[in-house]
Amino acid sequence: MENQKDRGSFSKIGFILAAAGSSIGLGNLWKFPYLTGQNGGGVFVVIYLIIIATIGFTCMLGEMAIGKYTKLNPIGAYKKIASKWKFVGVLGILVPFMIVTYYNIIGGWVLKYIVESVMGHLPGIAGDSENFFTSYVSSGGAPIFFTLLFVIINAIIIQAGVSSGIERASKVLMPTLFALLIVIAIRSVTLPGAGAGLEFYLKPDFSKLTLGTVTAALGQCFFSLSLGMGAMITYGSYLPDSSNIEKDSIVVPLLDTCAALLAGFAILPAVFAFGFEPSAGPGLIFITLPAVFDSMPLGSLWAVIFFILVLFAAITSSVSLIENPTSWLIDSYDMDRKKATWLVCFIAFLIAIPEALSMGIWSGITFPPMAMNFFDEVSYIAESILMPAAGFFMCIVIGHVWGMDNFEKAVTNNGEFPFKSKGFVSVMIKYIAPFAILCIWLNSSGILGLFMK
Ligand code: PHE
């Protein structure tokens, strides 16, 4: 039985901060700058902004509407609006759960980097910082310990409840994060030699545009806005009826995009100023940046500030990833919030152990279908296959099953608010968004490649 009692709720501003907290995470501070570095700089930024304003906004509104209307976790929500499509809700619980297992490991790396930079031990010179990172992540014991620490911080916040845990933490962490990010961005763009980085970042070179750029930008849009995995359905389910989700689904992507753009300003000019390569990939903040900080006056202070801000961003996101399965256990099994939280965190931690080891002693063990190690395989299946699939089916369910009339009632709260973007959203959600997601899914999952052979 779905239980409607005692689910908890957000205030209007609390919802915006919590939803922004969910969106703004490692996706903004870690992935966005390195994807920009790998995908040609400014041209990636332009494509990304277009996708956020069209598909991102539409899918955000879709998820918030489902959540607010049903007041249930993703599985309960899809059962209510289109019972045959319950599997989309199952994805909404499964995908965030898969993601959080390795998100916690990265959160643990960030904790370790804070400890090392506070003690002034973070190695600087490029070679050393690379050795430090690769030997640390493959070392087994310490990364698992820091993962556990990160999981416990999350559990403490979530078990305290929607308003006194998640909302309260977001109200402190989000404004602090923006303040720190602005300080670091100013430091970075005023470094001598920052100009080359600014040019790379802001001046699009359309000769670098490829299908890969678009695929990367769409995947990043979903990941960064926490879409395609029920996170916004769950948070939307804690919204008061009187909130205007059309506005919220503009404000949240706007805040998320500001954070991503600021992270680019914080990182790319500094990387160029000290003569490093922007295309280092996932190692950009863990390998290149420590070396960058080392070259700066007061470098370890900047490193501490930077990694604390990454930690804040990571926590508010992992909290929302964990909240999805937790809310399902509470709704469907009438489980106590504390019990549900610790259960989800415990299982997520257990799965993180082999994932962490798969970067070290178990790196030789690979899994089908992609023959990658466990960590890479789980992240590939979750982000490249299941997440876009859930986004695609959500558009189909809203546009063609639940229907635009019901969707409109949810958005307008039965006529209380206007639905200014109705025409645009309707075309987007019925046709353009699912078509775009499908093309990109076929490409990024490798399925298109099988047929082209
Ligand atoms: N949006 C988060 C980030 O940018 C990740 C996330 C995805 C969080 C899905 C919640 C749900 O890091």
Image (cartoon, rainbow, N blue to C red):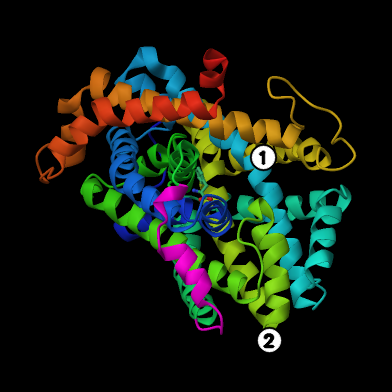
Label disc, if present, on residue 101 of the rendered structure: 1
Label disc, if present, on residue 298 of the rendered structure: 2
Q: What percent of the width, then of the height, locates residue 182?
A: 46, 75
Residue plotted at (71% across, 80% down): 295
Secondary structure found at label 2: loop
Amino acid at dot 2: Leu
Q: Residues within 10 Å of mark 2 (few under 14, many from 20)?
A: few
Q: What percent of the width, then of the height, locates residue 164?
A: 47, 58
- Report the Cα–Cα distance between label 2 and label 1: 35 Å
**Quadrant of the rendered structure where residue 149 is?**
bottom right
Image height of 122 relative to 101, above or below: below
In the image, 67 versus 287, the foreground residue is 287
In the image, 214 versus 229, the foreground residue is 214
**Quadrant of the rendered structure where residue 424 is?**
top left
Amino acid at dot 1: Thr
Would residue 340 be seen by someone viewing this image from the given angle? yes
The magenta segment is 190-208
